[in-house]
Image: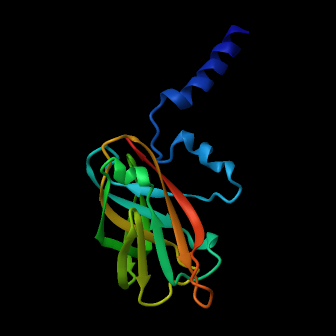
Amino acid sequence: MNRFLALAAGLVLIPFSAPSLAQNSLLEFRWRQDPGYVGLDYRISNSEARRRSNLKLILPGKIREHAILEMTIVAPEIFEKWRGRIDVDSMKIGYDCIQKSVFAGTRTRCENYFNLSEVTQVGPGIIRMTPDAPIPQSRTIVVELKMRNPRTSGLYQFNGYASAPGQMQIPAYQGSWLVEID
């Protein structure tokens, strides 16, 4: 009986004591209370507070219902309050991306990029990107941006919205990236 209790206690403690190689937090379940929530994957080059990093927001084609005419990324207001900055001029949308597994996790590198006719910051933390041609629904895309991480560690939820061709220009929710800053 004692062996069974020791084994059960060990199994319970392992997920919380072992370092995680994944970039999604165990606390992500808090944002899943909304039935329309779609959790998406991301890659970050440096998750330390106050550091410069490259953030890659992955949007799979299989969850989208339409092509993308215009993409909008919304960063949380608290991100800018804690001095997080996104370099709007460096934003790109890539496709034909390769994900390689390395010792500390997975890295993503895109082979090709869509030409963007316009990238504007509409408001604090709201960035709109317009490609020259609509992005096909079948393609998995990666929104790449350079940023300075906020000075406060925590979870920051970025939301993605997209307008489809032939519809009213009301962006539809595509999903959320829950980015963890250490």
Horizontally, residue 28 falls left or right of residue 154, namely right
- Please give the name of the residue rendered at 60% of the width and 48% of the height, measured from the top-left corner: 31
Horizontally, residue 33 falls left or right of residue 171, namely right
Horizontally, residue 30 falls left or right of residue 149, namely right
Residue farthest top in this picture: 2
Residue closest to the eye, 22 or 163: 163
Residue closest to the eye, 39 or 126: 126
Residue closest to the eye, 152 or 115: 152
The picture places residue 170, in percent across and down from the top left corner, at 58, 78
Quadrant in which the C terminus is drawn: top left
Quadrant in which the N terminus is drawn: top right
Query: Vertically, is 145 above or below 168?
Result: above
- Please give the name of the residue rendered at 44% of the width and 69% of the height, measured from the top-left corner: 142
What colour scheme has been applied to the protein in the rendered image?
rainbow
The picture places residue 45, in percent across and down from the top left corner, at 33, 54
The picture places residue 49, in percent across and down from the top left corner, at 31, 43
Query: Vertically, is 119 above or below 75?
Result: below
